Amino acid sequence: MNRQNNFIIFLLFVFLVIALILFWHAPLKVDEQDHYPQTVSYVNGDYAKPYLISTLTTYHAVLAVISKVAGGITSIKFFRAINLLFALIAIFIFGKICVNLKKEMTEVSMMQFAFFPIIFPYFFLVYTDILSLLMVLAAIYFLVRKKYQWSGLFSIFACAVRQDNIIWLGFFFILTYADEYGFKFRIKDLFQHLLKLWTFLAGLILFIIFVIINKGIAVGDKSMHPAFSFHLGNIYFFLFLFFFLFAALNISNFNKIVLLIKKRKLIIAGIVIFYLLFIFTFSNDHPFNYQWGDYYLRNAVLIFFTSSWIHKTVFFICAAYAILSLCVTEFRNKNFYLLYPFTFLFLIPSWLIEQRYYFIPFTLFLLFKKEDKKWVEWSTLALFVFASGLFYFVIRGNRYFL
């Protein structure tokens, strides 16, 4: 990484540390009320099984080990600082991946990732998602450098932090197969690929054993996170957020979308069918989504847009345009388009509509897409910085939460 990138990392470090200090005295936020006590109990040697935390407690164990090495510090300030450290490492690795992928605007891409609005506030909170994202980025870093065993090991650790990361383990395995053999399936090629990426196979076997023993994927609070279910809510909300977060890109793609529709007029029929499917399947029926609409911004949006078919239609227009924009957005490698079906597989099992589930798909999108015009990339960064600042202050002031 060149000096300019290192300087950006340094400036980000200073800025984020200041932001953390300003956040230190904020009370525990939402799930921190579960994650923080769980971590402290591990530091104190109490390893009782948690009942409210749906993930494995790997994240809490990591924090507890760091705490013990540091002399048993258990303040929320300390654990938030460790979480920010994970975020800084993630930003650094993101930049290294950009260099390996030969992105033309690495510095801008790094800043877009660092200030991604739905990710940024969690840099300062004791949540599992930043460590999960860090492990996935580490897996990608070693993947692009063709160090497959290390990539597999970090993929396994990502699954140990959040079980749903098993989808990304599969994605990396298929992506490397497609890079080497294309999309022709042959037993001989698959066998050779399994030998080369044996740590990925080990990860899959370990995951299957875990699901059998645990009798499901979620560890605690299983009634709110049923296994092997099918829900489209997160797909719709992901597209809705994409419409606004990547507004500049979507505007830039308008002419491409018009040309696409002119070339393939069946797209119009597809949009009509999609609308009918959407109207009947877009619902807000998870208990955690239709409560506390005056505090959770996500819930307020969902409650409003599911309140009538007119509101649903407005939501649909945003989601449909997002799909068309994604269709004309170019990736650096044709195999990277596998991200779309794997994002679908990643999101459909989740009944709870939650923007934290989109951290990894959006991050991979930032990595894989070709840079657009400079005004698009800089406008996107400006929007991200503004939205991140807004979310940071309303969460810090305990007025709202994402």
Image (tube, rainbow, N blue to C red):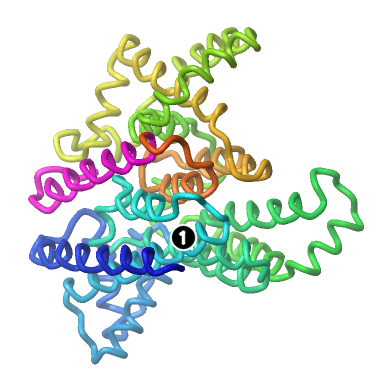
Q: Residues within 10 Å of mark 1 (few under 14, many from 20)?
A: many
Magenta segment, which residues? 376-402
Quadrant hosting residue 83: bottom left
Q: Name the main secondary structure of what is drawn in magenta.
A: helix
For image coordinates 35% across by 29% down, the residue present is 247
Q: x, y percentage for residue 323?
A: 51, 25
Check disc 1 and report its element: helix, strand or loop.
Answer: loop
- Relative to 286, is 52 above or below? below
Relative placement, left or right, of 88 versus 16 is right
Q: x, y percentage for residue 51?
A: 35, 62
Q: Nearer the viewer, residue 169 or 113?
A: 113
Q: x, y percentage for residue 230?
A: 54, 35
For image coordinates 51% across by 66% down, the residue present is 138
- Relative to 273, is 377 above or below? below
Q: Nearer the viewer, residue 351 or 21?
A: 21
- The amino acid type found where label 1 is placed reads Arg
Q: Nearer the viewer, residue 139 or 235?
A: 139
User: Residue beneath label 1, please?
Assistant: 162
Relative placement, left or right, of 399 versus 224 is left
For image coordinates 90% across by 50% down, the residue present is 186
- Relative to 227, is 144 above or below? below
Relative placement, left or right, of 37 versus 223 is left
Q: How many marks?
A: 1
Relative placement, left or right, of 270 versus 366 is right
